[in-house]
Image (cartoon, rainbow, N blue to C red):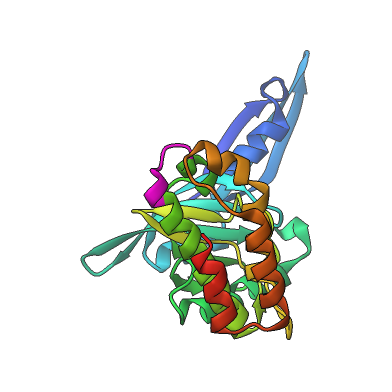
Amino acid sequence: MNPQGVILFLFSSLTNKPQIEKIIRQHLFQWEEVGRQKIAFEELYVYKIQKSTVLQELERNDVADITYTTHGCHGDIYRGIFNKGRKKTSVAIKIIRSSSGVKHALDSEVHWLKRVNEVGIGPQLLFSSREYVVMEFVNGPLIIRWLETATSFQIIRVLRALLKQCFVLDQLGITKEEMHHPLKHVFIQGGKLVLIDFERCSGSAKPKNVTQCVEFYSRIAPFLERRRVQLNVPLLRQFAGEYKHDKTEKTFKKILAAI
């Protein structure tokens, strides 16, 4: 469809008007009611439908095949293909909802994603605006699903990898906030761990990513045991207590060695 193209869409009130508008919005189009007429037991509407400014801008930036996937707390999540020269990259697009009233959340995500990308953490940030952020699409299962089929060797390797990323965040003075319950924020892509969702990050003189992660491991220890991975929870918590008061590589390695 041409960027300035127009669709005139006629539909009946019997077809669920709110659902029609939801579908239009999820496809990143905008609408304007240009006519209506009541007849018998229904009302007819005519909508003028056009590409939204966000969709037009994404297409100008060589993002194609954009499809809605789900919604988050403050925005909607889409998937697309970023065509850069001959290279095609699968991307995730987070678009802030105008009704959410929290555009600062997107600014925060972009800020912290840039920071953590510098140390190899998180999906690669490609570009952003005040209304959306485009990043590498993480193609893999959530950690809790991955744990159900992984070998004990693979599980131990990933548990240590998550702790290492948490330690890097601690050293940078960044608190991610969700590491005590990161089930929706940790993906496994090609055997490698990827953290997502950095909008709630904050700078802190006392970051707690490692200690929160240890607490998470302590809670899922019974599940890990069924997957043939045994954790010495009292020892882990003891080492986490030492680390809390002395966030050094020495105290961190004691935690790592206990996994």
Horizontal arrangement in the rendering, residue 242 relative to residue 228 (left or right): right
Q: In terms of depth relative to the viewer, which is nearer, 22 or 221?
A: 221
Identified at 46% across, 82% down, the residue is: 118
Residue found at x 63% / y 69%: 210
Q: Position of residue 139 (x, y in %)?
A: 40, 51
- Whether residue 139 is visible, yes or no, is no
x and y percent of residue 56 in the render? 48, 62
Does residue 254 lie above or below 215 as drawn? below
Q: As displayed, is residue 192 above or below residue 201?
A: above
Could you tell whether 4 is left or right of 83 in the image? right
Instruction: Determine the image quadrant of residue 88.
Output: bottom left
Q: Residue 104, how many percent across, how many down?
A: 72, 72
Nearest the eye: 33 or 236? 236
Q: Is residue 3 magenta?
A: no
Q: Is residue 78 visible?
A: yes
Outermost residue, top direction? 40
User: In the image shown, does 72 or 28 lie closer to the viewer?
Assistant: 72
Q: Which residues lie in the magenta part?
A: 148-154
